[in-house]
Image (tube, rainbow, N blue to C red):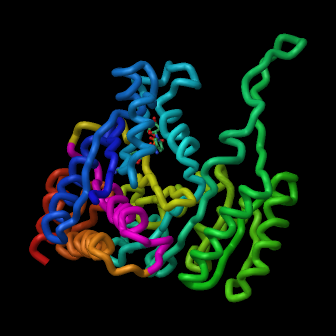
Amino acid sequence: MSKQMLCLPGDGIGPEIMAEALKALDAAKLRFGLDIEISHGLVGGAAIDQYGVPLSDETLALARNADAILFGSVGGPKWDDQPMANRPEKGLLQLRAELDLFANLRPAILFPQLAEASSLKPELVAGLDILIVRELTGGIYFGEPRGVRTLGNGEREGYNTYVYRESEIRRIAKVAFEAARKRGGRLCSVDKSNVLEVTGLWREVVIAESAGYNDVELSHMYVDNAAMQLVRAPKQFDVMVTGNMFGDILSDCAAMLTGSIGMLPSASLNEKNQGMYEPVHGSAPDIAGENKANPLAQILSLAMLLRYSLADGSSLADGSSLAEVAAADAIEKAVSDVLDKGYRTWDIASEGCQLVGTAAMGDAVVDCLLNA
Ligand code: NAD
């Protein structure tokens, strides 16, 4: 039976980089005989323009029925005056919540060819391989009550609520421990338990969960220290697990260690391995439509999609060797090959490189994929 993939390019550079990922998918289908049916939908600002809302019921129904969603990025100045409840980003948050995509896996791997592109010294980042596991459907981004109220003296006050239930902490901790077990065996849980009760509970539950993972070395770090350590000595980390807001910030910080936010894919999974796959970056309105965007994070997101959600019977990184997994490996190798050949978009450009635009970078990946 065909696997179902929903393609949601979104706004800004989203459609440009999605076009390159779809080229790579076509090439992978050809080479590996993959049977994948693709449907298309609008999300974010594009959906607001068409339907008045960032996620229509039709698109949500398509998403529910898909094995996996390849997502571009949403947002842009055109929709900045939308009320908060109808902002483009709400489409993304709603998808995450409706599909219960609670586990966000954000690898920060530095391709050796790009060690010079990092903002840190090459010796600090060469060989960097961190996995940030971010809780995605809870915490302060979803907590109620929230809003802006007017106080008795007429002054306005904004407020949000930071909440986590034990069960939410336990399930994300489990994903992180499992990932650590399959990698370097070290897990650092990031919280702010010296100030926030909710993260005091976080630490307690993570420690309780560690009882089932004696082979994983658990440590804890306050978020402010974690931010500092990420730029001071990032290679000390293997897997980091944290809540929604801290993970949002730390994963962007880790992104810069790798040289470009345009290189980083991410996966958001639910308990059935149904997943949404998207670059870590946003819609980059400053370069949209200029054929300047780096499509590699989107292409690497496709590779993660094939590995985690479309490989039959696969669970998180179970080492399955099906066609989809072989295709994922081949796509990742093709990305490494184009970097070896010196192709660079402007965000990762270095002296002597072959500077290319979005479409040419996609073509180079396809070429490496088909002529490996
Ligand atoms: P951004 O990630 O879009 O851009 C930050 C910087 O990185 C910009 O200079 C941009 O040009 C550059 N950049 C991003 N992706 C790139 C790529 N593939 N190739 C080369 N350069 C790239 O973040 P921002 O500017 O803070 O946000 C812009 C819009 O994106 C906002 O509307 C924001 O809400 C939205 N956003 C969406 C998502 C998402 O869809 N998941 C995530 C973050 C931000």
Locate the C terminus and report the quarter of the image it occupies.
Answer: bottom left
Among the 4 quarters of the image, the one containing residue 234: bottom right
Q: Residue at x 54, y 70 (%)?
A: 131
| Residue extent of the magenta highlight | 291-318
The image shows residue 164 at horizontal and vertical percentages of 77, 50
* 19 over 256 or under it: above or below: above
Quarter of the image where the N terminus is located: bottom left
| Residue 145 in view of the camera | yes
Q: Residue at x 76, y 77 (%)?
A: 210
Place of residue 243 in the rendered image (x, y in percent of width and height, measured from the top left): 68, 55
Query: Does residue 365 show up?
Result: no
Along the horizontal axis of the image, is 120 left or right of 250?
left
Q: Is residue 178 above or below residue 5?
A: below
| Total marks in image | 0
Please indicate whether residue 331 sits to the left or right of residue 61 in the image: left
Q: Which image quadrant is residue 334 in?
A: bottom left
Q: Does residue 25 belong to the magenta stretch?
A: no
State the residue at coordinates (66%, 41%). Answer: 141
Q: In the image, is residue 294 part of the stretch drawn in magenta?
A: yes
For the point 27% across and 74% down, the residue is: 323
Seen from this angle, which residue lies furthest bottom? 215
Residue 259, horizontal then vertical, whole percent:
41, 64
